Amino acid sequence: MASKGSARKRYEDLRSARWYGAEDLRAFGHRSRTLQMGYAREDWKGKPVIGIINTWSDINPCHTHFKQRAEEVKRGIWQAGGFPVEMPAISLSEPFQKPTTMLYRNLLAMECEELLRSYPCDGAVLMGGCDKTTPALLMGAASMNIPAIFVPAGPMLRGNWHGKTLGSGSDTWKYWAELKVGNITQKDWEEIEDGIARAPGTCMTMGTAATMMSAVEALGMSLPASSAIPAVDANHSRMASGCGRRIVEMVWEDQKPSDVMTEKAFENAITVVMAMGGSTNAAVHLVAMAGRLGVPIDLDRFDAISRRTPWLADIRPSGRWLMEDFYYAGGMPALLSELRDNLHLDAVTVSGKTLGEDIEGADIWNEEVIRRKSAPLSEEGGLAVLRGNLCPDGAIIKQSACDPKLLKHKGPAIVFKDYNDMAARIDDPDLDVTADSVIVLQHAGPQGGPGMPEWGMLPIPKKILETGVRDMVRISDARMSGTSYGTCVLHVAPESWVGGPLAQVRDGDMIELDVPGRRLHLDVSEKELAARFAAWVPPARKFERGFGAIYANHITQADKGCDFDVLMGMAATPEPEIH
Ligand code: FES
């Protein structure tokens, strides 16, 4: 089915025809230089050029298989009568890039958009998966708005240690705490290091990668049933070549991201995030992606959808299983099918069909992993949006990953002015802290981090860990890895670096958290708060030059998706002149 019923494009209408199809000096140059690479005229003549934006890198373990997958995408493009052009782009490797990949999400988004604009691309295959690569590629493609399809990297296989299943991130934090208090040995720890990441692919817990790949399938930008295929499964290779075949058709049909990434589609994506117990990072990325298309999605939409969406996927860290299990249980089509009454089934996807048609006949094969709506893990979704005098523009908490008895809590603040202050003092035996304290970290937001690093699962002080306590209320303007857990209030906006109320918290101030009431309150008189605001001195600027300065000048706050202000919206950007 052609999208929007439009007539098929003719070759002369393609962008690439301006590069290859003209009879002028410039087109001579483009053709002769393509011949120089060993291609014959038959390879491109009359065919759409498909840009494959590949975020493979030697330092990104989640994308190790992308060299091979790019070849499989090309195979599909050739089969369908397209001309594939692989274009490497910056690889945002979550484990290695410092201070955080989030500092560079918008850079990859810009690179994706400008690669597609400045080269003769008629369509795009977007290869990503490791955390920020997914939203970045979708943001760039949305702004360019030529036909595009996403190839999700897929999760790695389950980790294994002593016959126990290990999950990315989650079990690292868990066993690190056990090592600190002497419950496991150094040898155990090294064996865990050997077994926790034993195959290519993304984190296999419900981290940001799995959350965003799942959300993008629900959004309609990847092929049905693609997002949970383990990276090393032969089905993953077939999915990659399928994307290659499909993008060529999408070009002729002129099915653009704006036809797919509609308000209904974003509601479908948010619904899936809630039903998966997905990462809090989705609240930043989906807002940013929607902002590129002028689709009005804000934090209140997340909270409203969370309240009406049952949590069904029992995936760690909130649940028990891993993405490999989710795939065997039926994967995304099974979950979508169970959620059908909560979804806009008429939303069109890159398959060229509607979401309802895509999930026809899907069913759940393991009701432990994907629950029926009649037996949900919880009646509500995983995320909640908080408001109050400590977060006037909102904050996020993953309620499904909290100790339930902390969901309503009041306690005295213990404040760390930045990450280094926290690292230096958190395990000090003289730290004035009890299990009822509320740990506050300042200067960890979009400007303060910079890049809003995933520091939000603030460590529990050692002296509290030794008493057997494993969760406390923690508050910051940072983000948190989707593989993390605990009663962590995140994304406090506006952030402390720009003078948000979080900057005004002092040791001993009482803080009230009420997740069911969606409230976060600093129990300090208005007069006292006003005096603190008046005395507040802005921190010195971090960057005077380079990308950091561009970032600091243009980054928006968490509730706006942390996009650059100059990249948001749908204002037309001129096509390049070909001289
Ligand atoms: Fe790449 Fe987790 S480190 S997905």
Image (cartoon, rainbow, N blue to C red):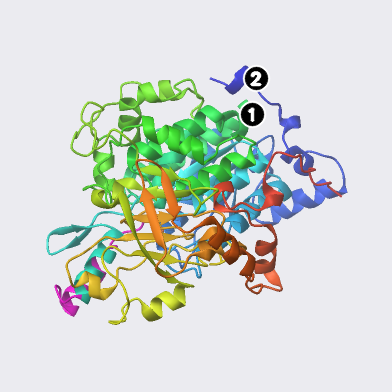
Q: Is residue 260 magenta?
A: no
Per the image, label 2 sits on a secondary structure element best described as: loop
Which residue sits at x=41%, y=75%?
Answer: 422
Exactly how many numbered labels are in the figure? 2
Q: Residue at x 32, y 78 (%)?
A: 431
* Residue closest to the eye, 51 or 181: 181
Q: Residue 64, how many percent across, how many down?
A: 41, 60
Residue 6, which numbered label? 2
| Residue placed most toward the observer, 448 or 189 | 448
Residue 198: numbered disc: none
Instruction: State the residue position of label 1.
Output: 254
Residue 230 appears left or right of 48: left
Residue 412 is situated, as x and y percent measured from the top left of the image, at 36, 64
- Which amino acid type is shown beneath numbered disc 2? Ser
Q: Residue at x 24, y 70 (%)?
A: 464
Residue 195 in magenta stretch: yes
Q: Find the distance from the CA under tag 1 to the CA under tag 2.
A: 8 Å
Asked if residue 82 can be seen in this view, the reply is yes
User: Badges 1 and 2: C-beta atoms under 8 Å apart?
Assistant: yes
Q: Residue at x 27, y 41 (%)?
A: 326
In percent of width and height, residue 505 lies at 48, 65
Give the residue type at disc 1: Asp
Q: Earlier in the sequence, mark 1 or mark 2?
A: 2
Q: Where does the magenta region start and end?
A: 181-202
Q: Is residue 90 visible?
A: no
Please tell me whether mark 1 sits on a helix, a strand or a loop: loop
Q: Is residue 211 left or right of residue 55?
A: left
Q: Is residue 303 left or right of residue 74?
A: left
Please rate how many residues cluster around mark 2, counting C-alpha atoms within 10 Å: few if below 14, some from 14 to 19, many from 20.
few
